[in-house]
Image (tube, rainbow, N blue to C red):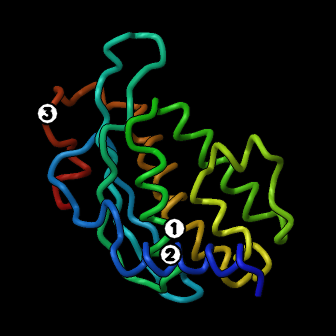
Amino acid sequence: MSSMDQLYQQLILEHAKSPHGKGLRAGGSGESFQVNPTCGDEVRLRVHLAPDLAGAAGPVVERVSWEGQGCSISQASLSVMADLVEGVPMATAEGLGETFRELMHSRGKGLDEDAEDALGDATAFTGVSQYPARIKCALLGWAALRDALAQAGTPDPDVAPGDVAPDQEDR
């Protein structure tokens, strides 16, 4: 195993042991529950948006909070994703999700330098992309983020800001 592979493996283990963003926070702008039917990994993720005060880039991902269970890959991927998307505009977070999906389909080859720089620690999952059964584990949180951002981007016109949408009352 190369020293880079060892470094990546260590990063994944550290994030799995002490996951960032874990602990579902109240409120949120969008929420998603996702399950990987292959292995049973699951996550409930909330995205908390803040208005972009500069007004140019749109809402900013203030925080990602989540609760879930699963293998070290799914938990670590959620943790790395939370670090990566917090503080960035919603559109940037969506773009990072697309880039991560491309990485997971690279079959271990990785992406170009600019894409990998944008992904930061998420490039640690390059090796995972060599194992089709594990790709869904790494993508679980990113699928939840995409869904939660889509919900956040389409507010219910019948719900005043701060109220709970009728379809979210039981959550």
- Helix, strand or loop status at disc 3: loop
- N-terminal-most mark, 1 or 3: 1
Q: Is residue 41 above or below residue 158?
A: below
Q: Is residue 58 above or below residue 22?
A: above
Q: Which of the numbered marks, if any, corresponds to residue 162? A: 3
Q: x, y percentage for residue 160?
A: 16, 26
- Determine whether, in the image, residue 135 is placed left or right of residue 50: right
Q: x, y percentage for residue 56?
A: 46, 11
Mark 2 or mark 3, whichever is nearer to me = 2
Residue in view at x 29 percent, y 29 percent: 50
Residue pointed to by mark 1: 77
Label 2 near label 1: C-beta < 8 Å? yes
Q: CA distance from mark 1 to mark 3?
A: 30 Å
Residue in view at x 37 percent, y 81 percent: 17
Q: Amino acid at mark 2?
A: Ser
Label 3 near label 2: C-beta < 8 Å? no
Camera-side residue of 55 and 171 = 55
Label 3 near label 1: C-beta < 8 Å? no
- Helix, strand or loop status at disc 2: helix
Q: Residues within 10 Å of mark 1 (few under 14, many from 20)?
A: many
Q: Amino acid at mark 3?
A: Gly
Residue in view at x 35 percent, y 70 percent: 19
Q: CA distance from mark 2 to mark 3?
A: 31 Å
Residue pointed to by mark 2: 74
The N terminus, quarter of image: bottom right
- Determine whether, in the image, residue 136 is placed left or right of residue 78: right
Q: Is residue 12 above or below residue 141?
A: below
- Helix, strand or loop status at disc 1: helix
- N-terminal-most mark, 2 or 3: 2
